[in-house]
Image (cartoon, grey):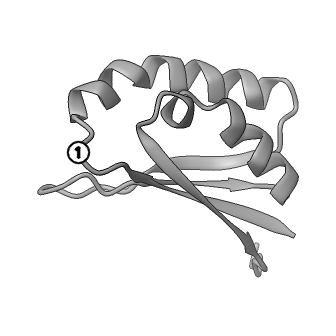
């Protein structure tokens, strides 16, 4: 069963810290994927007026937990992750 991680920015986090941390987050998810981590896709939700969070899709809850444990957005206190198991229906 796949898992989804929903990230919500912590209350009061300055968006400039998110922008500053993003290169470390990007390097982390690229390395995680390259090493065979079960990351399927990820990305931010877009909203013009407020931070809208982001989402990642993983092959399993274990892979989602492993990813979250080292993600700079989490380890540096910028985002709170919520891991949900997802009974996805693949149509393709």
Q: Nearer the viewer, residue 84 or 41?
A: 84
- Give the percent coordinates (x, y) of residue 62: 86, 51
The quarter in which the N terminus is drawn is: bottom right
Q: Quadrant of residue 67?
A: top right
Q: Is residue 54 above or below residue 73?
A: below
Q: Is 44 on the left-hand or right-hand side of 49?
A: right
In the figure, residue 52 lies in which quadrant? bottom left
Q: Position of residue 20 (x, y in %)?
A: 33, 19
Task: Please determine whether, in this image, residue 1 is positioned above or below residue 73.
Answer: below
- The front one of 51 and 43 is 51
Q: What residue do we see at 21% from left, 34% from top?
A: 14
Identify the image quadrant of the C terminus. Answer: bottom right
Give above or below for 2 relative to 91: above
Taking depth in this image into account, of 85 and 77 the one nearest to the observer is: 77
Residue 45 appears left or right of 13: right
Q: Which residue is mark 1?
A: 12
Total marks shown come to 1
Looking at this rendering, what residue extends furthest in the left direction? Answer: 49
Q: Would you place residue 59 above or below residue 74 in this image? A: below
- Nearer to the camera, 80 or 47: 80
Q: Residues within 10 Å of mark 1 (few under 14, many from 20)?
A: few
Return the x and y of residue 64 as percentages of the image width and height: 75, 50
Residue at position x 56%, y 30% in the image: 75
């Amino acid at each position: 069963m796949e898992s989804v991680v929903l990230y919500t920015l912590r209350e009061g986090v300055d968006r400039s810290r998110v922008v500053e941390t993003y290169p470390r987050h990007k390097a982390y998810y690229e390395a995680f994927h390259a090493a065979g981590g079960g990351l399927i896709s990820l990305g931010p939700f877009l909203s013009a007026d407020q931070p809208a969070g982001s989402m990642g899709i993983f092959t399993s809850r274990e892979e989602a937990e492993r990813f979250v444990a080292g993600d700079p957005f989490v380890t540096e206190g910028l985002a709170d992750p919520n891991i949900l198991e997802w009974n996805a229906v693949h149509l393709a």
